[in-house]
Image (cartoon, rainbow, N blue to C red):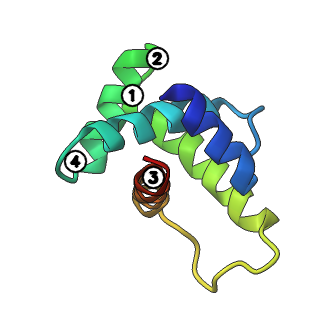
Amino acid sequence: MRNQIVLYLLKIGVRPHYKGFNYLITAITIALESNKRIPMLEIYEMVGRAHNVDAKRVERCIRTLVGIYYDSMEDAPRCRYTNSEFIYLCSEQMKLQEAKEG
């Protein structure tokens, strides 16, 4: 699953050389594996435990990565994505892609 997430993120233009990239992969994995929407604070804590960092660092690194991604978009929407919107948007897109292929 991790490889599919990495390929999806690279395809949409997320740059892998930021710390938030690995945190984002873990957060999307958690979102994909859950049947219900998990509060972001819980996701940050779960990602933090997985990477041995605190939830605040996870949130900040993902926010930076999402902001850089947003700034690099040519046809960006007027308002920026929040971390939760971006994570759940990616997970939903991956579910749709998997459903088409499977």
Left or right: residue 101 versus residue 42 is right
The residue to which callout 3 is attached is: 87
Tag nearer the camera, 2 or 3: 3
Q: CA distance from mark 4 to mark 1?
A: 13 Å
Left or right: residue 39 versus residue 101 is left
The residue to which callout 1 is attached is: 47
Q: Quadrant of residue 68?
A: bottom right
Q: Check disc 4 and give the amino acid type.
A: Ile
- Structural crowding at the residue carrying mark 4, measured as other residues with C-alpha within 10 Å and reported as few (<14), some (14–19) or many (≥20): few
Dot placed on the residue nearer the N-terminal end, 4 or 1: 4
Q: CA distance from mark 2 to mark 3?
A: 18 Å
Dot placed on the residue nearer the N-terminal end, 4 or 3: 4
Which residue is most to the top? 52
User: In this view of the protein, which residue sits in the foreground, 12 or 52?
Assistant: 12
- Structural crowding at the residue carrying mark 1, measured as other residues with C-alpha within 10 Å and reported as few (<14), some (14–19) or many (≥20): many
Q: Check disc 3 and give the amino acid type.
A: Ile
The residue to which callout 4 is attached is: 38
* Disc 3 element: helix
- In the rendered image, residue 63, in percent from the top left (x then y), is placed at 56, 51
Q: Are marks 1 and 2 in contact (CB under 8 Å)?
A: yes
Q: CA distance from mark 2 to mark 4?
A: 19 Å
The disc at residue 11 is: none
- In the rendered image, residue 85, in percent from the top left (x then y), is placed at 43, 63
Q: Quadrant of residue 47?
A: top left
The disc at residue 51 is: 2
